[in-house]
Image (cartoon, helix red, strand yellow):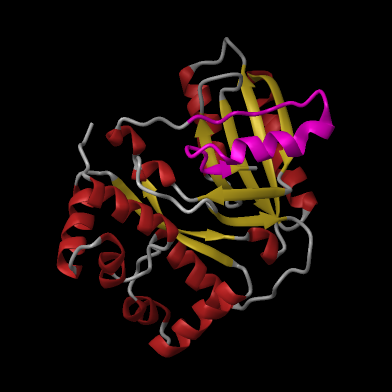
């Protein structure tokens, strides 16, 4: 477990809200000089606290549907077969997240597809090959997701009561983008702090053109935030996912309102 002071935590908090803001901008908010901010970010990267900088993309705006697959493996499954199944999901080009978890389910995958038949083909192929190793499974459809500012990083520091960072929702009109825009999203998805000049060089465009395109992607609601991936285990923290099944659907709004006030909540979907 690594000990971070208040300034480090404030830097992480600001990076998670917008990791493309400059070190000078972050410094003004946390009360440090630009070079000190750069040093602290580099140190947290070297120590593995900061794993990556990523871009939150509203795939609904690009015309994608989002499916989540929950799986319980058969108790007789061998480690090699389990590894093969996980690799099968990891290699699928439309897989966004592949997770092994502890709890009521063993495995969880999130799939993005524009065509429901594309999902059917993948899932049908999966069951055809691995059905005998799956004790139970079910599929859910993402309709809405909300992400919240990580105010728990600030301990007892005063926090704005509006913790919502962004929400995405299925439905609505999709936005058409071209190949260069997709390439920009590809690059920023794995390194959201990639300097504009380097991004322009990679794509063979001018910095002005790339900057204009990024602003348009933000304006059109495709890019929702530039964020930081934190290894919480190094901070002595753990992530827990809670799936709620409601007996009384009418109480859904009251439950959501209650959950949203928990300062440790960072995602609700």
Residue 237 placed where, x, y %? Answer: 36, 31
The answer to whether residue 24 is left or right of residue 176 is left
Residue 133 visible: yes
Q: Residue at x 55, y 76 (%)?
A: 181
How many numbered discs? 0
Q: Residue at x 24, y 52 (%)?
A: 7
> Magenta residues, as a range?
240-267
Q: Residue at x 52, y 42 (%)?
A: 90
Look at the picture and state if 248 lies above or below 156.
above
Residue 40 placed where, x, y %? Answer: 19, 55
Residue 32: which quarter of the image? bottom left
Residue 238: which quarter of the image? top left
Residue 196: which quarter of the image? bottom left
The answer to whether residue 43 is left or right of residue 258 is left
Q: Residue at x 67, y 40 (%)?
A: 257
The answer to whether residue 182 is left or right of residue 32 is right
- Magenta-span inclusion, residue 250: yes
Q: Which residue of the protein is positioned furthest toward the top in this rendering?
A: 76
Residue 120 vs residue 20, the one in the foreground:
20
Residue 145 placed where, x, y %? Answer: 64, 48
Q: Which residue of the protein is positioned furthest toward the front in this rendering?
A: 158
- Magenta-span inclusion, residue 85: no
Residue 206 visible: no
Residue 76 placed where, x, y %? Answer: 57, 10
């Amino acid at each position: 477990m690594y000990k971070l002071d208040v300034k480090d935590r404030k830097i992480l908090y600001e990076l998670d809200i917008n990791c493309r803001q400059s070190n000078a901008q972050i410094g003004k908010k946390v009360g440090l000089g630009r070079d000190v901010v750069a040093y602290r970010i580099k140190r947290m990267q070297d120590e593995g606290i900061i794993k990556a900088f990523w871009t939150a993309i509203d795939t609904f705006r690009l015309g994608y549907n989002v499916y989540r697959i929950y799986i319980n493996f058969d108790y007789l499954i061998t480690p090699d077969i389990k590894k093969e199944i996980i690799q099968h999901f990891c290699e699928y080009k439309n897989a966004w997240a592949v997770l092994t978890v502890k709890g009521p389910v063993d495995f969880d995958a999130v799939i993005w597809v524009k065509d429901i038949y594309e999902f059917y083909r993948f899932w049908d192929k999966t069951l055809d090959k691995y059905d005998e190793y799956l004790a139970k499974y079910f599929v859910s459809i993402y309709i809405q997701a909300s992400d919240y500012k990580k105010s728990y990083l600030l301990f007892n520091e005063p926090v704005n009561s509006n913790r919502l960072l962004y929400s995405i929702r299925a439905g609505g009109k999709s936005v058409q983008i071209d190949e260069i825009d997709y390439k920009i999203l590809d690059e920023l998805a794995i390194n959201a702090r990639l300097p504009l000049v380097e991004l322009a060089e990679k794509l063979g465009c001018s910095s002005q053109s790339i900057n204009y395109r990024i602003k348009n992607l933000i304006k059109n609601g495709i890019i929702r935030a530039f964020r930081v991936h934190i290894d919480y285990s190094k901070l002595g923290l753990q992530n827990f996912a809670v799936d709620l099944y409601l007996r009384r659907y009418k109480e859904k709004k009251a439950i959501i309102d209650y959950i949203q006030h928990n300062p440790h909540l960072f995602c609700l979907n």
